[in-house]
Image (cartoon, helix red, strand yellow):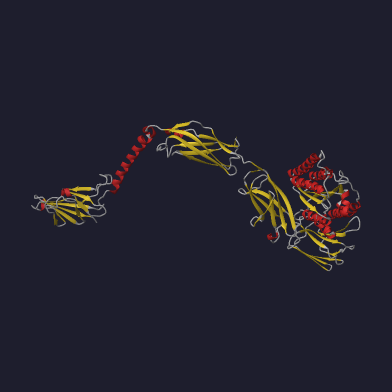
């Protein structure tokens, strides 16, 4: 039992620091030295435990205790002269009753240190019964006392939370040899304690139970796992006078606890600069032990293997306590924006609560993390990308805690708070009423105006930054959307004012506003587009557009006809000769004529180019050097390239004439000959 007591108190103080920078902690312990503590030597175990607290603190910590025998007196302990302070504790021999004033004195002491910038506060109450104010339920002042005690604790917790000062509370109750009435009194205070401070209650039964509960409290304060003795991560060995420690984690301090011996196995050699040793013992000969701290002066002990040689083999129940230098950061941020929550959030917003170790070992699997929400504990999941544990929830006002654990080595709990307020209500106020406009005047029509509102107030430019809008019309009407601090919907003609196919009559526009945080809202607005006569509605089309299009089409038709019409080849020539058969003087030969006319003689579009030489009309044939002999100039007795035209062939169709072919026409008074050439 004595061994457990000493071990537990060795576990008690490990600083919550990272990377060698010690945080300043303030610890105030309310010490029950009432007469009932004299039963079964409980006062000696309590004295021994208090000495251990002093022995295990760091020099930059602030420690004091308030004996219940002097409830208005805070006794400060000098940690630079702690062996002498331990002697003073052993010498304390007063005893009276258990007034709640002692707790109030401790609270005021913690408040003063919080005002001076303390990083972490601990309020520990060690008692073996109820406070005097809660002893008699029939006392007229009982209910008032109960409310005052609850209000004092609740206000203290709330004030520290507002100042963002970490406050931890532990209530250790020694309940052995209590009557049923006394147990009910103790249970009443335990309920008040848990409800107001959200603190830990460690009840005990019997003297050995006192030691076990104090041991568990000490482990929690030291960020150690009080519920497991399996040290899979950190290995410690004692062989003869040789001590070996293997740790994959950074370590603040290594502590050797020797108990049940009159001789201290002092450190002979070690790799550490600083070795501090203290003796602790009960006021009367019952338990005696030694605490030895090994550390560096200004740096943490890095992961590795360390060997310590003692002057002599230590007693069998010697324990080696490796105090972790681990910490983690709790962050609450919005899942959709990944922005950290520094104030209020809106009810229902998706949040991620993150616990990120600040000194990650080689294996993240060493760690486990749990979140306590609504009195239910849930496991957090590891995010390899973020190197952190995460838990997702929807925002609601709550206070919770996160515990990070390395089995048998490390446990630390941090609180977080989420303040959720109702999500602001979006709305759109219609500022345009009885909107009416002619369909022909939509180009210059005034807009439909809507005012975005948040909780009934006009939204600011900052609130409107990420807003998007959508407009739906139940008729075919074009619109233009403009917005700054207000929303303007300009109704415009469908396609254009010229081709105005806008539907008319009573219509409805539904405007939807979407905000990434506040959701979306829709608002309908009615309006009227008045119809006009066909001539008024389409006068530009009928007066200008259609006539212009028709003229354009006609001109293009003519131009294309001129371009695609068949033309004579540019070297096509026809020679003419008239032979009257009387004498050589009666033979008439004409100069060859070019069939193709000049470019400005365009002629009839699409109609093949024609040229009449004497009595024969030639027609151009597209895509070839050949020409056609027009059917209207064909006569009886005409010979085309040696072929006589029969009576039934005359005028039936154009006849093809190829280059170097001739046409002979016998006129009776003479013979006409035409030669066609095209080189």
Q: How many labels sit on residues?
A: 0
Relative side of 377 to 31, left or right: left
| Whole-percent x, y for residue 78 in the image | 87, 51
Residue 457: quadrant of the picture: top right
Residue 437: quadrant of the picture: top left
- Which residue occupies the extreme left position in the image? 582
Is any part of residue 614 visible from this angle? no
Residue nearest the viewer, comparing 413 with 103:
103
Is any part of residue 270 visible from this angle? yes
Q: Is residue 590 above or below residue 503?
A: below
| Whole-percent x, y for residue 485 in the image | 57, 36
Q: Residue at x 20, y 54 (%)?
A: 656
| Whole-percent x, y for residue 571 in the image | 25, 53
| Whole-percent x, y for residue 316 in the image | 84, 65
Relative side of 656 to 437, left or right: left
Image quarter hosting the C terminus = bottom left
Residue nearest the viewer, comparing 278 with 564:
278
Image quarter hosting the N terminus = bottom right
Residue nearest the viewer, comparing 628 with 145:
145
- Which residue occupies the extreme bottom position in the image? 240
Relative side of 523 to 247, left or right: left
Relative side of 302 to 584, left or right: right
Q: Residue at x 18, y 54 (%)?
A: 675
């Amino acid at each position: 039992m004595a061994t457990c007591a000493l071990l537990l108190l060795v576990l008690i103080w490990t600083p919550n620091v990272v990377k060698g920078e010690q945080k300043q902690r303030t610890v105030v312990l309310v010490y029950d030295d009432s007469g009932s503590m004299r039963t079964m030597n409980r006062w000696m175990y309590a004295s021994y435990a208090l000495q251990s607290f002093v022995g295990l603190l760091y020099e930059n910590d602030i420690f004091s205790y308030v004996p219940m025998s002097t409830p208005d007196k805070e006794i400060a302990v000098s940690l630079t002269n702690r062996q002498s302070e331990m002697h003073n504790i052993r010498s304390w021999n007063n005893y009276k009753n258990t007034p709640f004033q002692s707790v109030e004195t401790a609270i005021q002491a913690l408040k003063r240190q919080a005002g001076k910038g303390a990083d972490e506060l601990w309020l520990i109450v060690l008692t073996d019964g109820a406070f005097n104010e809660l002893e008699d339920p029939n006392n007229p002042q009982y209910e008032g006392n109960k409310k005052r005690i609850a209000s004092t604790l609740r206000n203290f917790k709330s004030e520290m939370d507002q100042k963002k000062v970490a406050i931890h509370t532990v209530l250790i109750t020694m309940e052995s040899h209590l009557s049923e009435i006394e147990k009910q009194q103790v249970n009443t205070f335990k309920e008040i304690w848990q409800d107001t401070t959200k603190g830990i209650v460690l009840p005990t039964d019997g003297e050995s139970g006192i030691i076990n509960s104090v041991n568990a409290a000490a482990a929690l304060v030291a960020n150690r796992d009080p519920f497991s003795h399996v040290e899979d991560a950190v290995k410690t060995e004692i062989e003869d006078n040789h001590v070996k420690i293997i740790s994959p984690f950074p370590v603040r301090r290594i502590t050797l606890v020797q108990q049940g011996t009159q001789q201290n196995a002092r450190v002979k050699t070690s790799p550490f600069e600083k070795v501090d040793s203290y003796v602790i013992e009960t006021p009367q000969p019952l338990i005696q032990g030694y605490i030895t701290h090994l550390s560096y002066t200004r740096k943490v002990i890095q992961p590795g293997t360390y060997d310590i040689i003692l002057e002599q083999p230590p007693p069998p129940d010697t324990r080696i306590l490796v105090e972790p230098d681990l910490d983690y950061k709790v962050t609450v941020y919005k899942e959709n924006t990944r922005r950290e929550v520094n104030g209020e959030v809106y009810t229902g917003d998706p949040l991620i609560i993150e616990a990120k170790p600040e000194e990650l070992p080689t294996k993240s699997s060493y760690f486990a993390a749990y979140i306590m929400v609504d009195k239910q504990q849930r496991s957090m999941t590891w995010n390899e990308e973020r190197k952190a544990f995460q838990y997702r929830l929807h925002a609601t006002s709550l206070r919770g805690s996160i515990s990070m654990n390395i089995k048998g080595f490390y446990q630390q709990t941090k609180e977080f708070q989420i303040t959720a307020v109702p999500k602001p209500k979006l709305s759109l106020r219609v500022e345009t009423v009885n909107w009416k406009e002619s369909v022909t005047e939509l180009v210059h029509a005034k807009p439909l105006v809507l005012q975005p509102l948040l909780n009934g107030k006009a939204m600011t430019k900052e609130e409107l930054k990420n807003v998007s809008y959508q407009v739906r019309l139940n008729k075919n009407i074009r619109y233009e959307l403009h917005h700054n601090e207000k929303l303007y919907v300009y109704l415009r003609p469908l396609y254009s004012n010229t081709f105005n196919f806008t539907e008319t009559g009573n219509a409805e526009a539904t405007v939807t506003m979407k905000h990434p945080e506040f959701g979306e809202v829709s608002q309908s607005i009615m309006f009227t587009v008045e119809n006009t006569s066909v001539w008024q509605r389409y006068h530009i089309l009928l007066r200008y557009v259609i006539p212009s299009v028709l003229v354009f089409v006609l001109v293009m038709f003519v131009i294309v006809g001129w371009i695609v019409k068949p033309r004579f080849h540019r070297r096509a020539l026809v020679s003419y000769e008239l032979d009257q058969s009387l004498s050589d003087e009666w033979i008439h030969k004409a100069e060859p004529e070019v069939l193709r006319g000049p470019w400005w003689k365009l002629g009839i579009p699409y109609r093949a180019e024609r040229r009449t030489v004497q009595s024969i009309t030639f027609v151009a044939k597209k895509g070839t050097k050949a020409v056609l002999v027009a059917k209207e100039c064909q006569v009886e007795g005409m010979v085309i390239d040696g072929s006589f035209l029969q009576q039934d062939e005359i005028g039936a169709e154009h006849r093809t004439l190829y280059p170097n072919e001739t046409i002979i026409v016998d006129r009776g008074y003479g013979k006409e000959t035409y030669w066609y050439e095209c080189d």
